[in-house]
């Protein structure tokens, strides 16, 4: 009986959440390569966070496989190393990021800021963006975070499309 329970837990993500960072709905093309064998799959991300992502693919790599993943979005490519945390044959795999180069970290941070509604810091607009925040009261900040969370929940439940959610998050920042 214990053996059956272990197989069930390893093969599924049910139970206590193990992620250490928030994931946001995120769709982009990607490819994942196993460095030793050069085996490669092509897929599409369905979510992204600072700690990892989920890749939709018919033939996921086995749990524990170390991969180099390239995620392509608009004119940017994020190249990052990760390890397969869980795999669902015929569906996809969860990837935990293990190594991020500094230049790649800035791309990931920019994408996460955009997805989460955090301000994206740009040198020429940084003073303007920070001034209203410093003057705003705690109730304004709380309302901002509540609205941000509501939009994210609606995205995760499929009530909003990615473009609708992105548009609302951008309006929230203005």
Image (tube, rainbow, N blue to C red):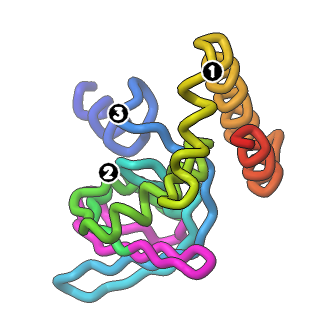
Can residue 46 be seen? Answer: yes
The residue located at (43%, 65%) in the rendering is: 107
The residue located at (34%, 62%) in the rendering is: 105
Q: Label 2's element?
A: strand
Contact, mark 2 vs mark 1 (Cβ under 8 Å): no
Q: Label 3's element?
A: loop
Give how far apart the Cα atoms at labels 3 and 2 are.
Answer: 10 Å
Can residue 91 be seen? Answer: no
Residue 77 horizontal/vertical position (percent): 47, 78
The residue located at (30%, 56%) in the rendering is: 97
Lower position in the chain sequence, tag 2 or tag 1 = 2
Give the residue pinned by disc 1: 136
Give the residue pinned by disc 3: 18
Contact, mark 3 vs mark 2 (Cβ under 8 Å): yes
Lower position in the chain sequence, tag 3 or tag 2 = 3
Lower position in the chain sequence, tag 1 or tag 3 = 3
Q: Quadrant of residue 147?
A: top right
Q: Which residues are magenta?
A: 56-78
Residue 16 horizontal/vertical position (percent): 39, 24
Give the residue pinned by disc 2: 85
* Residue at far bottom of view: 38
Contact, mark 1 vs mark 3 (Cβ under 8 Å): no
Q: Mark 2 or mark 1, which is nearer to you?
A: 1
For disc 2, the neighbor class at 10 Å (few under 14, some 14 to 19, many from 20) is many
Q: Quadrant of residue 81?
A: bottom left
Seen in the picture, residue 168 relative to 15 is either above or below; the reply is: below
Left or right placement of residue 7 versus residue 127 in this view = left
């Amino acid at each position: 009986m214990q053996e059956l329970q272990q197989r069930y837990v390893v093969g599924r993500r049910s139970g206590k959440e193990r992620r250490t960072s928030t994931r946001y709905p995120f769709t982009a093309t990607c490819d994942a390569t196993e460095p030793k064998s050069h085996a490669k799959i092509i897929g599409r991300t369905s979510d992204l966070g600072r700690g990892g992502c989920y890749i939709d693919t018919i033939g996921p790599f086995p749990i524990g496989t170390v991969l180099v993943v390239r995620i392509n979005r608009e004119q940017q490519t994020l190249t990052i190393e990760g390890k397969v945390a869980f795999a669902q044959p015929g569906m996809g795999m969860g990837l935990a990021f293990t190594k991020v180069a500094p230049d790649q970290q800035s791309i990931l941070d920019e994408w996460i800021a955009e997805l989460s509604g955090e301000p994206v810091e740009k040198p020429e607009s940084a003073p303007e963006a920070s001034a209203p925040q410093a003057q705003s009261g705690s109730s304004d900040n709380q309302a901002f975070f509540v609205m941000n969370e509501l939009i994210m929940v609606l995205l995760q439940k499929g009530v909003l499309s990615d473009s609708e959610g992105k548009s609302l998050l951008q309006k929230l920042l203005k």
